[in-house]
Image: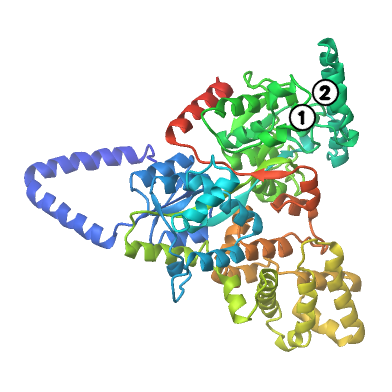
Amino acid sequence: METKEEKPQQRFFKNKWKKVALVSSVPIIAGAMVSLGVYKYSKPFKPAFYNYKSYMYQGNIDKINNNFTYKVFDEIIEFTTALTNRKVSAGIGSEFQAVGLIKKDLIRPINFQKFFQLDHKPNKTELEAMLKNIYTEPVWNHLASYDKDINDAKDLTEEQWNQFKEKNPDSIKHLWEYVLPYYVQDSMIGYNPLKSKASKDPITEEMLRENAKKLNENYWTKLGKKFEKEGKQDEFTTILNGVDQRDLKPFNYASIFNIFNYLSHNGYSNFVITDAVRNNMLYGSAYNKVALDSTPDAPFELENLFTGNTTIANYKWSIDNFISLVQDSTSFRIADGKHIAFDGDGQNILRNLIDPSRKDVDVALMFNGDALDAYYSEDNELRDENGNIVPDGTIQAFKFNKNIILLDTFVVAKDVNEQTEDIIYDSIRSTIFANLNKINNVMVAKRITDKTEAMKETLLDYYQEYLEFVFGEKPELLTSMLDELKAIYKETIKEEISNEDLQKFNEFVTQKFENDPALIAQFKELFPLEEENAIETDEEFVARVANILSHVNLGNEAYFEEIVETKYPNLTNFDFINYTPSTTVDYEFIRRNYFITDENEYDLRAIKIYEIALTDKQREENFEHKGIGSVDDKLRSQLDTYYFNKTKS
């Protein structure tokens, strides 16, 4: 950017250049050509690497920039255009974008032999087994769900699809052959209680359940009167009698409709929605406005209409239903622009939601990663009118039932040469996808066949490395208790996490100190208080040591700088982004270690935001994730135009 001081100097230089050029243009041009040649020689061309804005740790960007020109985009169409025009060698986009790129033959399969540095090229069966170990179950299932789409078989029944696969086993393409999953997301509704015009207390699940009950009762009463007026009371009664009154539909307690409705009637009036067309169409598909107003059968059929597949026949229907969903639930019209806003920048959404001065945003429909970032509000350094930072945990969030699952994916352009491909894999292997195949390596080295057991052993390796670092000055002290600590740690790696598990470390430390009081002095020497002359009770000291031993602490600056940044750049990436990892090891490592408070307890609210996998209870209550199907360019243009006209004009 030019400054006022620079402009006269530039003008002087240009005028001086013109005068010299009149006298000796040939030598100068020749010199310029030599200089240009020297510049090109010293600054060789670097292929482009594309990514979303604010979606990679700076240390990893710096490493990638050694061999590539790292570029960011605001809209994913920019990445698609760059691939179409052969202006980019690799980058990160979305899974449904990748499906379209495969169909257009713009990206190539990942060379897993080269990337994983294997001694042979794995066949499809071998590769599938390896990747199932690497990726979390929701991510693998999501990848596999695109098989029909990629092979232009979306309209086939499952039976027809299975027959098609049997007849054409070698020609079937799979999304998992073409992409490396980056981070996975679903969506949430976040709100800031400090901005409520009513109660500042958090909203509970019970409050939402009670609101849904009232909505459903009102709906059935209104519909009953309508059918009575039309002389169809018997038909209505027959249907209603077959319904469990505890499970009246159509309004689930965790639906977008119910959450928006409760918020709008309890002190919240300024909603911002992530401006993602296809996402919002998917949400709209779960709310069939016309059917709800016409027939008592509709509430029991709506769940079958929830879809991310968009066609020429249903795109207007999905958008119209999304508009109705927002307006009917809040009683605010989108067109007036006073209470409903759209924003495509996740960082902007979360900062405005946190910021006490932004009274125009008190509710946000946002990605779970942005909700987690907002939850840790102190990192954003936003202050109230008294100069106080908004404390962590201020932002509350609910995960809604008919939800999206989005997977950002790394792809390689179709036409890259072998040398560039080598550089690509070297670059990502040492940065964002470092240690990706670690779980399979552990399975081979330790002769483990079970994925869960291999994951636990991998986490134990990380834990031991961490202990060796923090016990650095007293390795003999660690040796005397390493096996016991690892045994306790392994017990705490489980699907159902509990603070009782972490208390086992308090019990361990207490027992050790009671059995050998001399250990107390050794531990005090090893882990001194940061503040000089600070006073700490014996109980507080035990709790502090237990906290140090209970988890791999990424907040330990020395450990982070010396170990994590060097060996685990994949973990530095999460610490910056806060989106949910797509790989089994990273997902479980973060879940087990990242969300532990100074009181040595799990932050269960943060973990609920972080988790993607649905619990059995959620499935029983009709929670589900669906992905977005691919569309061709013509349909995309049509739906974008229709959506714009409906939301912006």
Residue 136 appears at what percent x and percent y?
A: 64, 59
Residue 290 appears at what percent x and percent y?
A: 69, 21
Residue 572, by quadrant, is bottom right
Q: Report the residue marked by disc 1.
A: 299
Drawn side of residue 536 relative to residue 338, left or right: right
Q: CA distance from mark 2 to mark 1?
A: 10 Å
Marks 2/1 in contact by CB < 8 Å: the verdict is yes
Q: Nearer the viewer, residue 384 or 599?
A: 599
Q: Is residue 174 visible?
A: no
Which kind of residue does numbered mark 1 sit on? Pro
Around disc 1, counting alpha carbons within 10 Å, would you say few (fewer than 14), some (14 to 19), or many (20 or more)?
some
Question: Which corner quadrant holds the N terminus?
Answer: top left
> In the displayed structure, would residue 458 be above or below residue 77?
below
> In the displayed structure, would residue 599 be above or below residue 468?
above
Which of the marked residues, 2 or 1, is nearer the chain's N terminus?
2
Drawn side of residue 304 relative to residue 95, left or right: right
Residue 353 appears at what percent x and percent y?
A: 69, 38
Around disc 2, counting alpha carbons within 10 Å, would you say few (fewer than 14), some (14 to 19), or many (20 or more)?
some
| Residue at point 33%, 44% (across, down) | 85
Element under label 2?
Answer: helix
Which kind of residue does numbered mark 2 sit on? Tyr
Q: Is residue 62 visible?
A: yes
Residue 104: image tag: none
Drawn side of residue 290 relative to residue 205, left or right: left
> In the displayed structure, would residue 141 be above or below residue 545?
above
For discs 2 and 1, the disc positioned in front in the rendered view: 1
Q: Nearer the viewer, residue 344 or 355?
A: 344
Q: Report the residue marked by disc 2.
A: 219
| Residue at point 80%, 61% (across, down) | 496
Question: Which corner quadrant holds the C terminus?
Answer: top right
Element under label 1?
Answer: helix
